[in-house]
Image (tube, helix red, strand yellow):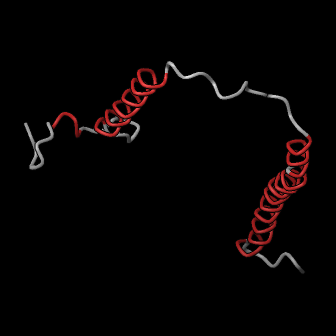
Amino acid sequence: MFNEVGVPSYIQSVNTNGLSVRSILATAIFFITGAVTAHTLYRDLDPVASLDWSLGINARKLIVAQIAPFAISALLYFFVSECIHLLEALVIIYSIPDRLPFNWMD
């Protein structure tokens, strides 16, 4: 029932989605330990400052700066995918005459 390290064999089984029960268990224990530690040690501390969710001028500049790369990426994605479909169609069209039993250029 135990392997050479002493871990029970049922913990080493693999889920259908490829995640092992052992890694899921380790992640859950890590999260619970962090949550309990934060709750018990830091619950009496006051917040340092109020949380401000508004966008300042610097944040707006950074968001605007992301528009151009995003637009270029989107255009390339759609343009390249259309070019690939066009190239596939051309390859099919130009490969058909090679399979014909007669010379279609005459």
The location of residue 100, given as percent across then percent down, is: 74, 71
Residue at 33 percent of width and 35 percent of height = 15
Instruction: Please tell me which residue lies in front, 35 or 104.
Output: 35
Residue 106 shown left or right of residue 31 in the figure? right
Give the quadrant of residue 94.
Answer: bottom right
Q: Is residue 15 above or below residue 50?
A: below
Q: Quadrant of the C terminus?
A: bottom right
Q: In this orientation, which residue lies closer to the viewer: 49 or 99?
A: 49
Q: Please provide percent x and percent y for residue 27.
A: 38, 36
> How many numbered tags mark residues here?
0
Q: Give the left or right position of residue 77, taking residue 20 as reference.
A: right
14 sits left or right of 56 in the view: left
The answer to which quarter of the image holds residue 80 is bottom right
Compared to residue 43, the image places residue 61 above or below, namely below
Task: State left or right for residue 34 relative to residue 64.
Answer: left
In the rendered image, the vertical position of residue 93 relative to residue 104, given as above or below: above
Identify which residue, 73 or 53, lies in the foreground. Answer: 53
The residue under the point 45% across, 27% down is 38
Could you tell me which quadrant the N terminus lies in? top left
Look at 63% across and 24% down and name the residue there.
47
Q: Say which of 43 and 8 sits in front.
A: 43
Q: Position of residue 93 (x, y in %)?
A: 80, 66
Q: Is residue 66 above or below residue 28?
A: below
Which residue is at a point 30% across and 35% down the rendered structure image? Answer: 21
Q: Residue furthest top?
A: 44
- The quarter holding residue 103 reads bottom right
